[in-house]
Image (cartoon, rainbow, N blue to C red):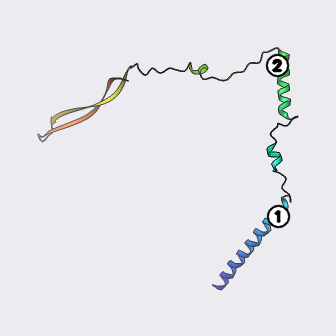
Amino acid sequence: MKGEDTLMERRQFLAGLAGIAGAAAIAMALPRHANALTADTLTDTTPQEGGLLDELKAGSEESVKAEGVEVAQHRGDRHRRHGPPRRHHHNRRRRVRRRQFRQVCNRYRNRWGAWVRRCRREPIWVWHWI
């Protein structure tokens, strides 16, 4: 018993040492002064110039002017694909056909002479006003 206890204590001690060494290595890798985020960079909301976006905008304008194509904007409205939006007239009623089930029962005598009733569900179509 005593040997197992000392073995466990050694393992815990070594695990603690490894954790301290890892924390020290991470602390050495990080910079001393964290200048990555400062209040000045967060308050400056003006876009930076000379980036890739400016080059793409300039290239597209030149190509459009060179080809003589008129630039148009499309909003992507829903009615272009599915028709105009429908107006719902709540005061108009219409008839619809719905499927319902009715119970149909048959009565007969079984082989011992007793009356037996067997029922089943039959689908029917019913007209409703909605």
Location of residue 68 with respect to 78 vertically, above or below: above
Residue 3 rendering spot, x and y as whole percentages: 67, 84
- Residue 109: image quadrant is top left
Identified at 74% across, 72% down, the residue is 16
Identified at 72% across, 78% down, the residue is 10
Location of residue 14 with respect to 129 vertically, above or below: below
Q: Is residue 129 left or right of residue 60?
A: left
Residue 79 rendering spot, x and y as whole percentages: 59, 20
Mark earlier in primary sequence (1, 2): 1
Q: Given the current orientation, which residue lies at the most extreme right position?
A: 50
Residue 66 rendering spot, x and y as whole percentages: 85, 17
Amino acid type, residue under disc 2 in the picture: Val
Which residue matches tag 1? Answer: 25
Q: Given the current orientation, which residue lies at the most extreme left position?
A: 113
- Closest to the observer: 87 or 110? 87
Which residue matches tag 2? Answer: 64
